[in-house]
Amino acid sequence: MTARLLIQLAAVFGGLGVAIGAFGAHALHDMLVKAGRADTFETAVRYQFYHALAALAAGVLWAARPELRSLGTTGALWLGGIVVFSGSLYALCFTGVTKLGAVAPIGGLLFLAGWVSLILAVREL
Protein backbone atom coordinates (compact mmCIF):
# COMPACT_ATOMS: atom_id res chain seq x y z
CA MET A 1 0.00 0.00 0.00
CA THR A 2 1.12 3.56 -0.62
CA ALA A 3 0.12 6.79 1.10
CA ARG A 4 -1.73 7.78 -2.07
CA LEU A 5 -3.70 4.52 -2.16
CA LEU A 6 -4.53 4.81 1.55
CA ILE A 7 -5.87 8.33 1.04
CA GLN A 8 -7.88 7.21 -1.99
CA LEU A 9 -9.37 4.20 -0.18
CA ALA A 10 -10.18 6.35 2.86
CA ALA A 11 -12.01 8.73 0.51
CA VAL A 12 -13.93 5.83 -1.03
CA PHE A 13 -14.97 4.54 2.39
CA GLY A 14 -15.87 8.05 3.53
CA GLY A 15 -17.99 8.62 0.42
CA LEU A 16 -19.66 5.25 0.83
CA GLY A 17 -20.41 6.18 4.44
CA VAL A 18 -22.27 9.27 3.22
CA ALA A 19 -24.18 7.28 0.59
CA ILE A 20 -25.01 4.35 2.86
CA GLY A 21 -25.95 6.63 5.75
CA ALA A 22 -28.23 8.75 3.58
CA PHE A 23 -29.82 5.69 2.01
CA GLY A 24 -30.45 4.22 5.45
CA ALA A 25 -31.82 7.46 6.87
CA HIS A 26 -34.24 7.98 4.00
CA ALA A 27 -35.01 4.98 1.82
CA LEU A 28 -34.49 2.29 4.46
CA HIS A 29 -35.55 4.12 7.61
CA ASP A 30 -38.96 2.48 8.00
CA MET A 31 -37.60 -0.99 7.26
CA LEU A 32 -34.75 -0.55 9.77
CA VAL A 33 -37.09 0.74 12.48
CA LYS A 34 -39.58 -2.06 11.86
CA ALA A 35 -36.79 -4.64 12.08
CA GLY A 36 -35.41 -2.98 15.21
CA ARG A 37 -32.07 -2.40 13.47
CA ALA A 38 -31.89 1.40 13.14
CA ASP A 39 -29.39 1.67 16.01
CA THR A 40 -27.27 -1.13 14.58
CA PHE A 41 -27.22 0.57 11.18
CA GLU A 42 -26.27 3.91 12.74
CA THR A 43 -23.43 2.25 14.65
CA ALA A 44 -22.09 0.71 11.45
CA VAL A 45 -22.16 4.06 9.64
CA ARG A 46 -20.62 5.93 12.60
CA TYR A 47 -17.68 3.54 12.94
CA GLN A 48 -17.18 3.56 9.17
CA PHE A 49 -16.87 7.34 9.26
CA TYR A 50 -14.59 7.43 12.29
CA HIS A 51 -12.17 5.02 10.74
CA ALA A 52 -12.35 6.42 7.21
CA LEU A 53 -11.32 9.78 8.69
CA ALA A 54 -8.62 8.13 10.78
CA ALA A 55 -7.28 6.32 7.70
CA LEU A 56 -7.33 9.61 5.78
CA ALA A 57 -5.29 11.26 8.54
CA ALA A 58 -2.83 8.36 8.55
CA GLY A 59 -2.46 8.62 4.79
CA VAL A 60 -1.85 12.36 4.92
CA LEU A 61 0.73 11.93 7.69
CA TRP A 62 2.41 9.16 5.72
CA ALA A 63 2.52 11.35 2.61
CA ALA A 64 4.15 14.11 4.66
CA ARG A 65 6.52 11.71 6.41
CA PRO A 66 7.29 8.86 3.95
CA GLU A 67 9.66 7.22 6.42
CA LEU A 68 6.60 6.26 8.52
CA ARG A 69 5.81 3.34 6.21
CA SER A 70 4.13 1.39 8.99
CA LEU A 71 1.23 3.85 8.73
CA GLY A 72 0.23 1.70 5.76
CA THR A 73 -0.39 -1.16 8.18
CA THR A 74 -2.35 1.18 10.44
CA GLY A 75 -4.57 2.27 7.57
CA ALA A 76 -5.01 -1.26 6.28
CA LEU A 77 -6.15 -2.43 9.72
CA TRP A 78 -8.73 0.36 9.93
CA LEU A 79 -10.01 -0.23 6.40
CA GLY A 80 -10.23 -3.95 7.11
CA GLY A 81 -12.11 -3.14 10.30
CA ILE A 82 -14.62 -1.13 8.29
CA VAL A 83 -15.19 -4.03 5.93
CA VAL A 84 -15.57 -6.60 8.72
CA PHE A 85 -17.24 -4.55 11.49
CA SER A 86 -19.49 -2.24 9.52
CA GLY A 87 -19.97 -4.78 6.75
CA SER A 88 -21.20 -7.46 9.12
CA LEU A 89 -23.58 -5.00 10.79
CA TYR A 90 -24.93 -3.85 7.42
CA ALA A 91 -25.42 -7.47 6.42
CA LEU A 92 -27.18 -8.17 9.72
CA CYS A 93 -29.53 -5.22 9.12
CA PHE A 94 -30.40 -6.28 5.59
CA THR A 95 -30.64 -10.03 6.05
CA GLY A 96 -31.76 -10.44 9.65
CA VAL A 97 -29.20 -13.24 10.04
CA THR A 98 -28.19 -12.63 13.63
CA LYS A 99 -25.11 -14.85 13.43
CA LEU A 100 -23.52 -12.11 11.33
CA GLY A 101 -23.34 -10.02 14.50
CA ALA A 102 -20.79 -12.50 15.83
CA VAL A 103 -18.36 -11.37 13.12
CA ALA A 104 -18.43 -7.72 14.24
CA PRO A 105 -16.00 -8.20 17.17
CA ILE A 106 -13.33 -9.33 14.70
CA GLY A 107 -13.71 -5.98 12.96
CA GLY A 108 -13.54 -4.29 16.35
CA LEU A 109 -10.24 -6.05 17.01
CA LEU A 110 -8.95 -4.77 13.67
CA PHE A 111 -9.93 -1.24 14.70
CA LEU A 112 -8.11 -1.65 18.01
CA ALA A 113 -5.06 -3.15 16.31
CA GLY A 114 -5.01 -0.11 14.02
CA TRP A 115 -4.89 2.24 17.00
CA VAL A 116 -2.04 0.24 18.55
CA SER A 117 -0.30 0.27 15.18
CA LEU A 118 -0.61 4.06 15.09
CA ILE A 119 1.01 4.34 18.52
CA LEU A 120 3.91 2.22 17.31
CA ALA A 121 4.18 3.96 13.93
CA VAL A 122 4.63 7.42 15.39
CA ARG A 123 6.72 6.59 18.46
CA GLU A 124 9.76 8.28 16.90
CA LEU A 125 8.11 11.56 15.89
Image: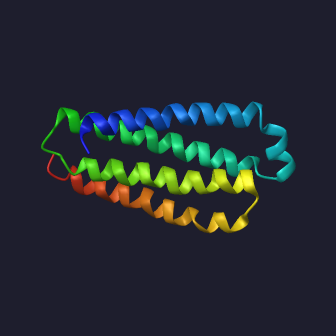
Nearer to us in this view, 123 or 85? 85
Looking at the image, residue 106 lies above or below residue 81: below
Q: Is residue 3 left or right of residue 107?
A: left
Report the coloring of the rendering: rainbow
In percent of width and height, residue 119 lies at 28, 55
Tell me what residue is drawn at x 45 percent, y 45 percent. Answer: 51
- Residue lying at the far right in this picture: please name it: 34
Looking at the image, residue 11 lies above or below residue 32: above
Tell me what residue is drawn at x 85 percent, y 39 percent. Answer: 30
Q: Quadrant of the N terminus?
A: top left
In percent of width and height, residue 102 lies at 62, 68
Looking at the image, residue 107 lies above or below residue 75: below
Tell me what residue is drawn at x 65 percent, y 64 percent. Answer: 101
Q: Is residue 74 left or right of residue 111?
A: left
Q: Quadrant of residue 4?
A: top left
Q: Quadrant of residue 12?
A: top left
Q: Is residue 115 left or right of residue 94?
A: left
Q: Is residue 14 left or right of residue 33?
A: left
In percent of width and height, residue 17 lies at 56, 36
Q: Quadrant of the C terminus?
A: top left
Nearer to us in this view, 27 or 46? 27
